[in-house]
Image: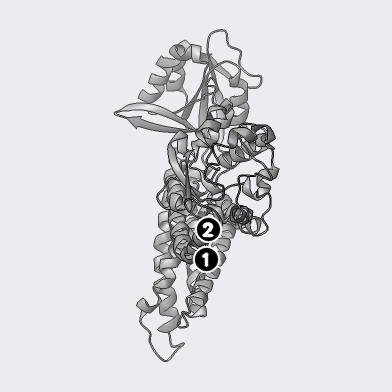
Amino acid sequence: MNQRARTLGIAWAISDLVLLVAAYFGAYELRYRMGWLPDVLAWDRYLLLPLLAIPTWLLFGLAAGLYRGERRKLAREAGALLRVAVGTGLVLAAAAFLLKQQHQSRPLVVLYMGFAWLQAVALRGLVRLVAAPDARRKVRTIVVGGGEQLEEVCHALAGQTDVELLGVIALPGQPVPRGVRCLGPIEDAERILRSEVVDEVVFVIAGTHLSEVEHAFVVAEDLGLATRLSLGFLPARKSRIEYEEVGGTPFLRFTTAPTHPISLALKRAFDIVVSAAALIICAPLFLVIAIAIKLDSPGPVFFGQVRSGLNGRRFTMWKFRSMVVDAEKKLEELRDRNEMSGPVFKMRDDPRVTRVGRFLRRTSLDELPQFWNVLIGQMSIVGPRPPLPSEVDRYERWHRRRLSVKPGLTCIWQVSGRNDVDFEDWMKLDLAYIDQWSLWLDFKIFLRTIPAVLFGRGAR
């Protein structure tokens, strides 16, 4: 996502949140001050609605792609907004029921979401109406450069409905794609850019020709023309590219990990809420498990193990102890019985596992203390499982990319069979999660984890 799209997405998110507040007061006035009920109730009694609606609407909106800054048809946008409004309304109704908020009015919820949807659609329609003349105007574009990428870029630009490709200013000895007008050599760039009505200049060059187009780039900037630079000469294959400035020096930032600040902030908020709630709710269960472990075998209740986290940061991951105390010392004796390929050790009938430990592992109850790691920010609810440093040392280069995001309690591997999945497929699943990451994907994995844990699928 480029900076313009990100800024536009944030603007839409802020406008929707402002409209949610306005819609609440409008719905309240219509419901309770228009004679529908004889008694007038205080609006602050219903503050649960906007307080819950705002983060819920934003979460559903992110999942629906409303805040990516993409140009979409109004009908498609209105449909996405309707799904967000319905989803938010269902959450509000469910919250009122679970919290026993009997005074919460179902008609008020319907009116609230109806108002919010109408206002959001109306604002988007108004923006499109105001911006219609600019939207219909085609961007007159000239391409400067040569090389293997030139034909591909020209073809892509010609296929865009909002672009009018005027032609190519070619580098010496570089052919111009068939069907594209040659405007002249690079030496005449200033004359050409002055004589043509141009909105944007696209530079398509190999790394060895950067110096040849420097003058043309400066001319385009001096003339006030927008410029774009094709980065086809760079080896990046999976990275997202972002522009930033450090001390006035421009940089292009390449990253394969998610970077959207709002989405990551919501992910962290979800981690804090879920982990805190889990630690509080499960406190009695912690006590029962601790007693069972103590009665079953000598040793501590908890087992702390150093793991590799975000970009290789080491931290202590906590579990309920499920093995005998000297389990790690006995590991070398069992290496030849490893049932998992790669650097990971997995064994179906591991003799080091205690009786209580076998039950804890089968039900995944041994993982519960890791909610503490999530709460303090070392892990996330959803993310690749944290490996041992010794395993990371044996990773192939492409395996290490799974460390580019914070490790988690559950990921695609956990809901796809866990130990029944081969190591190479496990790594590919983790990388697919990173490449396709979204809040909605996290939510789906979280929901799929529940039956996977209940039925112990792939657990050992």
| Location of residue 329 (image quadrant) | top right
Query: Percent from the top left, x then y, of residue 92?
Result: 50, 71
Which is more N-terminal, label 1 or label 2? 2
Would residue 180 be found to the left or right of residue 268 on screen?
Answer: right
Residue at the image position 58 percent from the left and 37 percent from the top: 330
Question: Which residue occupies the foreground of this view, 174 or 451?
Answer: 451
Q: Amino acid at mark 2?
A: Phe
Q: Against 278, is 429 above or below?
A: above
Question: Which residue occupies the foreground of this view, 343 or 135?
Answer: 343
Residue at the image position 47 percent from the left and 51 percent from the top: 302
Q: Are marks 2 and 1 in contact (CB under 8 Å)?
A: yes
Residue at which label 2 appears = 60
Number of numbered callouts drawn? 2
Is residue 199 visible from the viewing direction of this image?
A: no
SS class, disc 1: helix
Q: Against 278, is 236 above or below?
A: above
Is residue 171 visible from the viewing direction of this image?
A: yes
Q: Amino acid at mark 1?
A: Thr
